[in-house]
Image (cartoon, grey):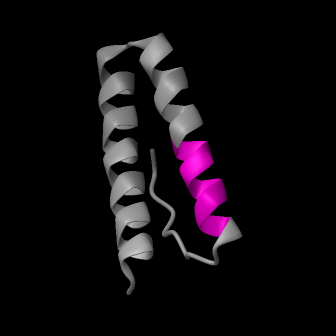
Amino acid sequence: MDAFTAGLLQRIKATESDLSRARDEGDDFLVEVEQGELDDLRRLAAEHGVEVRAHSV
């Protein structure tokens, strides 16, 4: 796995965690921010052929 792929997957994992925390805390604004970031990261992964495992977030 190259550095780009590893970094991207790590950012996705961290963002999923942040999104889950925001949902648990009931922070609707932060949920929207984190969901947008996650969508962007997943789109970037798809554009570069990086397979992302689906997580329940």
Image: 4 above or below 11: below
Image quadrant for the N terminus? Answer: bottom left
Image quadrant for the C terminus? Answer: top left
Toward the viewer: 17 or 46?
46
Q: Which residue is pictured at 36% across the width and 65% down the height? A: 7
Q: Which residue is pictured at 39% across the width and 83% down the height? A: 2
Magenta range: 38-46
Q: Which residue is pictured at 52% across the width and 44% down the height? A: 38
Q: Quadrant of residue 23?
A: top left
Residue 27, x across and y down, in percent? 39, 13
Q: Inspect the magenta stretch and tell me whether residue 35 lies in it.
A: no
Toward the viewer: 44 or 21?
44
Residue 53, x across and y down, in percent? 48, 69
Toward the viewer: 19 or 40?
40
Please name the predominant secondary structure of the magenta segment in the image: helix
Q: Which residue is pictured at 31% across the width and 43% down the height? A: 17
Q: Is residue 55 left or right of residue 41?
A: left
